[in-house]
Amino acid sequence: KISMLALFASSPTWLPASTAGRRNVPASSVRTGGAALSAELAAKQAWLARTQPSWGPPSQLSGSVEPTVAAAPPVDEAAAKQAWLARTQPDEPAWRGQSSPAESAARLAFVHAPLSYFALDKLASKGTRRAGGSLVDVGEPEDWSRPIAKDAWSGARAGSWACSEGGWDSPKLRPTTETFLVLEGWGCVTDVDGTQHSFGPNDVVVLPRHWSGRWDVARFLHKVWVVHDHPDVPAGADGVVRAVVAPAWPHFGAPLHEGTIYDGGHTRVGVAPLAPGSVAVSAAEAGFWSSATAKFLWILDGVLFLTNADGSSRRCVAGDTAVLPAGWTGLVDTVQPARVVWVDVD
């Protein structure tokens, strides 16, 4: 369970009801037994009136005339399937019928995974970090993970990771750039020069390629991540590769961050508000929705629909992860004001 309400003045809508508070049901909305039966009877009569058979009752028939039942209208199975998928939001990534991101990208379809896909009970245990070779010196941290898939988009992969309390040195230079959004928990990463970067729920953290230092998990940590394998990027003026932490949602009086958080050349990260409206996405489109690069989205708030060029679509709500492969074309329809964390990779 994600439990963040006590930590924020306001929280994204993807928080489960148990953390956002439960509303009492007004007594007037609860029917008594008699009222419920009357309502059911009225509903049944209305249904019968709408669904009368096309043949008359037996008293209207004579001789050997048989009743004829009107043929059912043809069913568009593809449309029905899409409508069903949109209603049920299955607890698996949507590949538009494909088996991997590579095949999906080849046919330029987006990928979508609901927050429930990364529920803690669906992450696979990796064992203790000590057993995995980490230089653990505080506690006995254990971690769990689940990727969306093993294949990559433009050298980047996405998934979720969780870890119990503990700390370890991380002296090996990172071979990739990792960006993650904290769903639950508290922690700190420390640069090689001793600079500390604390983070908590709704913070975006970037660990650039060649970062090294230390990890400390103060409270059970759960995050969603994007890891990008790309060419080298220059270090800071002092030669230190530093972590970046920025709030994606206001808390403890922290300002609401919008715009670019990190730009490492091959990896760019930011937070963006989406106003209601429709945008046609293509490589020719300039600005935020250009598909010249692959784009990863974490939906913080609001509702939007992604539609592929073939018409297949998916409703995306707060907590969801979406991937738009490089070269993807389609429509983005924002139906309720939304806020997203985005990661562009090339």
Image: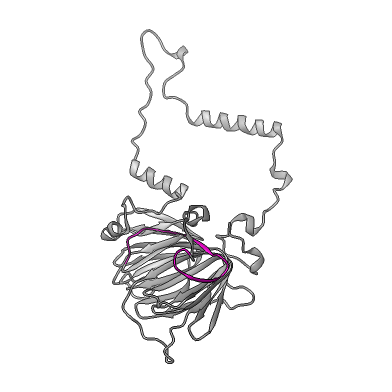
Q: Looking at the picture, how far across and down is residue 245, in whole percent?
A: 51, 77
Count of numbered badges drawn on the protein = 0
**In the displayed structure image, the side of residue 257 where residue 210 appears, left or right:** left
| Residue 307 appearing in the image | yes
- Front position in the image: 42 or 209: 209
Which residue is rendered at x = 46% and y = 17% of the image?
57
The quadrant in which the N terminus is found is bottom right
Which residue is rendered at x = 32% and y = 55% of the image?
100
Q: Looking at the picture, how far across and down is residue 171, in whole percent?
A: 44, 78
Which residue is rendered at x = 50% and y = 60% of the image?
319
- Front position in the image: 256 or 210: 210
Q: Looking at the picture, how far across and down is residue 16, in whole percent?
A: 59, 56
Q: Which residues are magenta?
A: 131-153
Q: Looking at the picture, how far across and down is residue 80, in whole percent?
A: 38, 43
Does 198 appear in magenta?
A: no
Q: Residue furthest top?
A: 63
- Front position in the image: 61 or 241: 241
- Where 299 sits versus 268, above or below? above
- Where 324 sits versus 98, above or below? below
The quadrant in which the C terminus is found is bottom left
Does 146 appear in magenta?
A: yes
Q: Residue furthest bottom?
A: 237
| Residue 201 appearing in the image | no
Which residue is rendered at x = 61% and y = 61% of the image?
3
- Where 267 sits versus 1, above or below? below
- Where 309 sits versus 60, above or below? below
- Front position in the image: 20 or 179: 179
